[in-house]
Amino acid sequence: MTGGEIWGAIVGYVTFWALGSLFFRLRGQEGLGLGDAKLLAAAGAWLGISALPMVVLLAALGALGFAVITQRGRTDQLAFGPWLAAAFFVLWVLRIDTVW
């Protein structure tokens, strides 16, 4: 593991942990679970710290597009983990392709 991968895991976990904790303190309900934080930490460890913003952006755009297409309301829950996993996978495949 290089320094970018170690910091990617740390920053990925701490960022989502802090956002989830802040949301819980403000709203009194869970909005972002620790599974999401662990998944982002894995993405950071695998792809490096520089890929984290793109992972979150692709996941957010995918989830937002899905919510719009399915006409979900503000109060409807939507799991973010599958979108994180999909974005992680897409970026991983693109990086593997550049190595070959």
Image (spheres, rainbow, N blue to C red):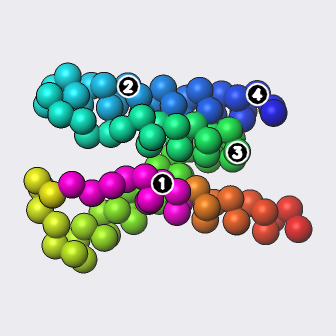
Residue 23 image offset from top left, x and y in percent: 23, 31
- At horizontal 70% and vertical 65% (from top left) the residue drawn is 93
User: Which tag, 4 or 1, sits closer to the chain's start?
Assistant: 4
The crowd level at tag 2 (other Cα within 10 Å; few <14, some 14-19, many 20+) is few
User: Which tag, 2 or 3, sits closer to the chain's start?
Assistant: 2
The label on residue 46 is 3
Residue 68 horizontal side relative to residue 13, left or right:
left
Residues under labels 2 and 1: Cα distance? Answer: 17 Å
Residues under labels 1 and 3: Cα distance? Answer: 14 Å
Verify whether residue 86 appears in magenta. yes
Query: In the figure, residue 95 lies in which quadrant?
Result: bottom right
User: Which tag, 1 or 3, sits closer to the chain's start?
Assistant: 3
Examine the rendered structure and indicate whether residue 38 appears above or below residue 93. Answer: above
Q: Are marks 2 and 4 in contact (CB under 8 Å)?
A: no
Residue 52 horizontal side relative to residue 28, left or right:
right
Mark 1 — residue? 84
Q: Magenta region, mostly helix, strand or loop?
A: helix
**Magenta-colored span:** 77-87
Amino acid under disc 2? Ala
Query: In the figure, residue 10 lies in which quadrant?
Result: top right
Residue 27 image offset from top left, x and y in percent: 13, 31
Please tell me which residue lies in front, 79 or 90.
79
Pair 3/4: label in front = 3
The label on residue 3 is 4
Residue 3 image offset from top left, x and y in percent: 76, 27
Residue 75 horizontal side relative to residue 77, left or right:
left
Helix, strand or loop at label 4? It is: helix
Verify whether residue 27 appears in magenta. no
